[in-house]
Amino acid sequence: MGGKMSSKDPVVTRHYQVRGNVQGVGFRAFVSRHAQKIGVRGWVRNTGEGDVEVLAMGTSSQLDELAGYLRHGPMLSLVRGVEESEASPIQSSGFSVRD
């Protein structure tokens, strides 16, 4: 499960919008920790509407694993929904938390 990207697996980019009680509960740190563990690149940030937005690059299996974490969230969160869409590739060497 997870692991680093292999040259034989195509890299894809996905955008996620996580809705629910997801701000002020350590959600961004939770996402960043799991994304780094899986080997995904990109970023996570809070939105002005109270959601958390994630842009991630990795193999399909890596992003599927990340999406599972997004749907579950950290202990104090209450995820009501995750919208997922394809996105354009980004230049990123790691995974960061944005303001």
Image (tube, rainbow, N blue to C red):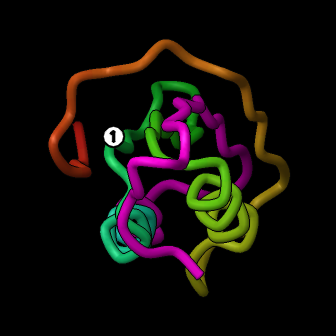
Q: Can residue 54 be seen at all in this image of the molecule?
A: yes
Would residue 45 appear left or right of 76 to someone viewing this image?
Answer: left
Q: Residue at x 72, y 67 (%)?
A: 68
Q: 93 or 27, which is in the foreground?
A: 93
For label 1, the residue is 42
Q: Residue at x 33, y 41 (%)?
A: 43
Residue that sits furthest to the bottom in the current view: 75
Check the image and name the residue furthest to the left.
93
In the rendering, at what x and y percent does residue 52 appear?
Answer: 53, 42
| Image position of 8 (left or right of 51) | left
91, above or below 79, in the image: above
Give the farthest residue toward the right: 80
Please state which amino acid type lies under the numbered disc 1: Gly
5 drawn magenta: yes
Count the labels in the image.
Answer: 1
Magenta residues?
1-28
Residue 95, compared with residue 34, is above or below; it is above
Q: Residue 10: say if magenta.
A: yes
The residue that appears at 72% across and 25% down in the rendered structure is 85
- 56 on left or right of 84: left
The image position of residue 57, as x and y in percent, is: 44, 39
Name the spot of residue 69 as percent of width and height, x first.
63, 70
